[in-house]
Amino acid sequence: MSTRRNRTRRYLVKGGTALHGHVRVSGAKNQALAAMCASLLTDDYLVLENVPDISDVESLGELLETIGATVERLSPSTLRISGKGANVFEAPTELITENRASFQIMGPLLARHGFASSAPPGGDVIGQRPIDVHLSGFEAMGAAIGRDGERYVLTRACGERLHGARLFLDYPSVSGTQNVMMAAVLAEGSTTLVNAATEPEVQELARLLNLMGARISGIGTQILHIEGVPELHGATARIMPDRIEAGTWAIAAVMTGGDLEIEDAPSEVMDAVVNKLRATGALIEEREGGLRVAAQGTPRAVNFQALPYPGVATDLHAPLAALLTQAEGVSIVHERVFDNRMLYVGELRKLGAEIVSTSSSAVITGPTKLNGAHVRALDVRAGAAVLLAALVAKGHTVIDEIYHLDRGYERLDHKLRSLGVEIERS
């Protein structure tokens, strides 16, 4: 894996460019990270194609190498990983707290090796990410849950496999569903997950596990059935295009008054955002291999709430809110997934946005004239929101802490420059 990116970099963006042209969507971050954790379920090689070149992939690759796995980059978008050498089952705290997906090594390590230890997951500061779904699932399958300071310690009886169970997930957590599912595929007997997450990335992980020899049915529903098997084998799989990146480009086209061909946009899993953009008045055409998104005058105000799939994705909440600062009328948005997703509000206000917010809702009045300012990318999606706002702001905007954007968007500045945007990284 390549060396970690410099966390001190910033963007300087000149606003006023309508986006026109073609842009290709990279592989899905949230599927790629879960698939990398699944490599710990077998000694064989797992080859993953269309992996995005982002810092979250780098940090998770470093974590896997730290515990003894082999991670090779065969090409800029292809990884080959083997869990054969994994012999350290305590995840380094500094790597776990960087990347919330890192906690998903716990299910595979527990299932295969009977022991796993980790600090709570980190990542964006967007509210509580309770891991009760993970821990209660592991416990129901026979694991003992302990604490060693801040670290969670999971063990199962020596010489025994985890056992199947019927589990009700208090919340359809994406990472919780993925983690428990990865543990259950090697458990003895049958496991049923009720109220499982149905996000496309969860479905793709289940299909990957089946390709590796697992027996999972009910994929795409809220009830997953898993017949445990003694072992899994290697496989080659392609990571799906990132629906969140595709949605961000679609929003950017509408917000800037542009016209974009978004190649590899997975329109079949983008109904919610496509519906909202059409409600603003945008032209959206589904084409073979992607979408065409074009603005048609000043967008209209719309209301939305961020919900689990198939609702509007919480990861598109902040970018959509940025768009609505340029919409005619008053828009009301609600966050139903994370309790601190509104970090973007203060940064958009620095640019001139008119937003009144509570901890989980916002009232946005538009269109407002935005002006360049000095702002921060406070998390991956808040960073996308301020970058979108910078594209339409008058003058220059400085965006600090863009390492957050590096975590979720591949070569973002390169793609923007190809569409005519004046953007510099320093």
Image (spheres, helix red, strand yellow):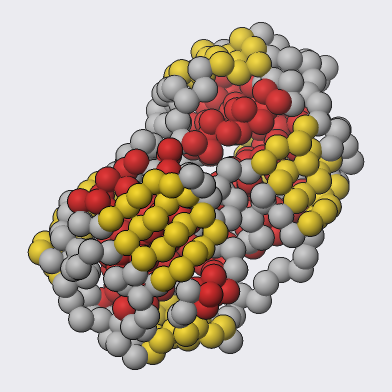
224, 422: nearer the viewer: 422
Q: Is residue 293 left or right of residue 266?
A: left
Image quarter hosting the C terminus? bottom right
Q: How many marks?
A: 0
Q: Is residue 389 left or right of residue 352?
A: right
User: Is residue 120 positioned above or below 252 on the image?
Assistant: above
Residue 52: % across, % down? 64, 56
Is residue 127 in sight in this rendering?
no
Image quarter hosting the N terminus? bottom right
Is residue 189 in sight in this rendering?
yes
Residue 245: % across, % down? 48, 56
User: Is residue 128 positioned above or below 76 on the image?
Assistant: above
Residue at horizontal 52 percent and vertical 27 percent from the top: 136
Residue at horizontal 60 percent and vertical 51 percent from the top: 27
140, 194: nearer the viewer: 194
Residue 33: % across, % down? 63, 46
Residue 161: % across, % down? 74, 17
Q: Is residue 67 left or right of residue 397?
A: right
Q: Residue furthest right?
A: 85
Residue at horizontal 66 percent and vertical 76 percent from the top: 6
